[in-house]
Amino acid sequence: MAELLNRFGRRIGLLTALEIGYPVGRSGSRFQARVASDALEGLDTSRLGFFLVEDESGKRYPAMIDHVAPLSEDGRLTAIAGVVVAGG
């Protein structure tokens, strides 16, 4: 189960339709996913910084989110995208 986590490893929300440009290296790879819109409530999406993306296999990647947009076809979901890098 893929998840979006804060920088301390606390779950923000479950991710669906997660796509990561594997292999993930130190120079980074693009990712995109969907998350429940209410999971982002209270987050300042104009200043999204450091997060963790956990893929379906449990591997965690430091992530920087640079795109957040509600899905027009389903307002309960939000599309997110950004860059993940290989962890230390």
Image (cartoon, rainbow, N blue to C red):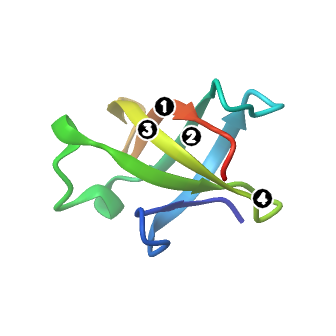
Tell me which corner region of the image, top left, top right, bottom left or bottom right, holds residue 19.
top right
Crowding at dot 3, Cα within 10 Å, few <14 / some 14-19 / many 20+, comes out as many
CB under 8 Å between discs 2 and 1:
yes
Q: Which residue is mark 4?
A: 56
Residues under labels 4 and 1: Cα distance? Answer: 17 Å
Q: Which residue is mark 1?
A: 81
The first of marks 4 and 1 along the sequence is: 4
SS assignment at label 2: strand
Residues under labels 3 and 4: Cα distance? Answer: 19 Å
Residues under labels 2 and 1: Cα distance? Answer: 6 Å
Amino acid residing under circle 4: Glu
The first of marks 2 and 4 along the sequence is: 2
SS assignment at label 4: loop
CB under 8 Å between discs 2 and 4:
no
Q: Which residue is mark 2?
A: 33
Q: Is residue 23 left or right of residue 65?
A: right
Nearest to the observer: residue 25 or residue 34: 25
Q: Position of residue 24 (x, y in %)?
A: 75, 34
Q: Position of residue 12 (x, y in %)?
A: 41, 67
Q: Is residue 78 left or right of residue 63?
A: left
Residue drawn at point x = 34 percent, y = 34 percent: 68
